[in-house]
Image (cartoon, helix red, strand yellow):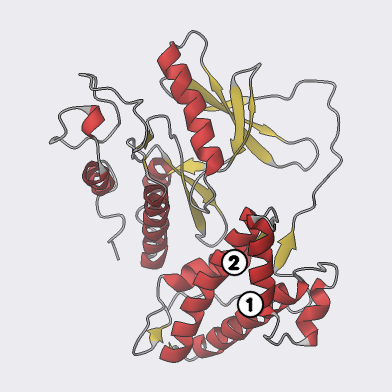
């Protein structure tokens, strides 16, 4: 009997088998035997849209309504299909420049009457001779370090510290979250639960975690350069509206995703929203710090007088009663905790 992974793969291959892929793109994915045709089809479709938008932007014209609807549908389909591949055990990633271009397009694309192309639109560099998708290898040989890596503290919370370090093989910066010594059993439970919950999540706007080290009581995670608080304080007067809108949408997409998983974050704040910073104002929002996360099916939360969390709904009388309405109050409350006008300033 086929496994769920087998069925996902079979359905994807069947979905794309009759869609044409120009030789110019299929040749780029000849080394990806099973999914080469699918990726070539998607690459071709993305390039057709990006090229058309680049041309339309030269005269500040709208992107046609029908093509706008097609691109929105393509974005949704692309993300669903890459997620299906991930669930089947195949790591396929869209190049960062293309991913960021799609996120930007989502902020101005409309389903009717054409989509006005923003004045600050930056043309997408079209990939014609390089892959737009990368296919992760199953194994890799890494260096064996004989000396400890230097850690730099970048943050501290009630029961854990966060450090950064540079991977010796690739020169890439990562983070480590380590529990403080002497924390009580309940906070230790929360620390491990935080890792387990985040490890089970797979979404662009949630911080990715890696492996839990039982000996050191720590886990690895992707490194993010700034908190939303730091970002706002240093750039609030100079950011374009499209960047503000993109940040707001990513934040809401991430929050909606964890809600669809039956989870409540319960500690939404400017400190717990992290950002990965790129050139030309491009950013990726990453929800983090799931230490107070609540699974609606869990009985772990007790009725208690201690109210935790940074932004709390004044109508909430005990933490066990925390629900979606209180989460949305906290999300809206971000604008009253130091980010006033950030999402709406011109």
For the N terminus, the quadrant is bottom right
Circle 1 crowding by C-alpha within 10 Å: few under 14, some 14–19, many from 20: few
Q: Which residue is mark 1?
A: 15
Residue 193 against residue 170 in the figure, above or below: above
Instruction: Locate residue 161, reporting x and y percent.
Output: 51, 23
Judge by depth and name the residue closer to the eye, 117 or 279: 117
Give the alpha-carbon distance from disc 2 to disc 1, as whole Å.
10 Å
Seen in the image, is 111 located left or right of residue 199? left
Circle 2 crowding by C-alpha within 10 Å: few under 14, some 14–19, many from 20: some
Q: Quadrant of residue 83?
A: bottom right
For label 2, the SS is helix
Instruction: Locate residue 201, reporting x and y percent.
Output: 52, 45
Instruction: Locate residue 199, reporting x and y percent.
Output: 56, 39
Q: Marks 1 and 2: in contact by CB < 8 Å?
A: yes
The residue at the point 49 percent across, 8 percent down is: 182
- Marking on residue 81: 2
The residue at the point 53 percent across, 54 percent down is: 204
């Amino acid at each position: 009997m086929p496994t769920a992974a087998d069925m996902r793969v079979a359905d994807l291959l069947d979905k794309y088998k009759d869609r044409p892929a120009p030789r110019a793109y299929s040749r780029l994915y000849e080394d990806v035997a099973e999914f080469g045709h699918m990726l070539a089809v998607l690459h071709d479709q993305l390039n057709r849209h990006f090229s058309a938008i680049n041309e339309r932007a030269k005269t500040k014209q709208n992107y046609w309504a029908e093509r706008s609807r097609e691109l929105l549908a393509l974005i949704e389909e692309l993300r669903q299909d890459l997620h299906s591949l991930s669930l089947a055990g195949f790591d396929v990633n869209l190049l960062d420049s293309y991913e960021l271009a799609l996120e930007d397009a989502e902020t101005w694309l409309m389903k009717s009457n054409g989509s006005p192309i923003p004045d600050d639109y930056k043309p997408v560099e079209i990939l014609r001779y390089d892959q737009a998708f990368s296919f992760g290898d199953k194994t890799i040989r890494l260096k064996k370090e004989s000396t400890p890596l230097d850690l730099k503290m970048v943050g501290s919370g009630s029961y854990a510290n966060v450090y950064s370090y540079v991977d010796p093989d690739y020169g890439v910066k990562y983070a480590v979250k380590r529990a403080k010594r002497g924390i009580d059993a309940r906070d230790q439970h929360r620390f491990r639960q935080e890792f387990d919950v985040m490890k089970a999540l797979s979404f662009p706007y949630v911080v990715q975690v890696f492996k839990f080290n039982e000996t050191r009581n720590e886990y690895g995670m992707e490194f993010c350069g700034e908190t939303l608080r730091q970002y706002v304080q240093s750039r609030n007067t100079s950011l374009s509206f499209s960047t503000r809108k993109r940040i707001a949408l990513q934040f809401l997409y991430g929050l909606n995703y964890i809600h669809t998983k039956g989870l409540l974050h319960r500690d939404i704040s400017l400190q717990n929203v992290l950002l990965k910073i790129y050139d030309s104002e491009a950013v990726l929002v990453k929800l983090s710090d799931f230490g107070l996360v609540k699974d609606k099916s869990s009985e772990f939360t007790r009725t208690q007088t201690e109210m935790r969390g940074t932004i709390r709904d004044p109508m909430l009388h005990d933490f066990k009663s925390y629900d979606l309405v209180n989460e949305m109050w906290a999300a809206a409350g971000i604008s009253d905790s130091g980010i006033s006008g950030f999402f709406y300033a011109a």
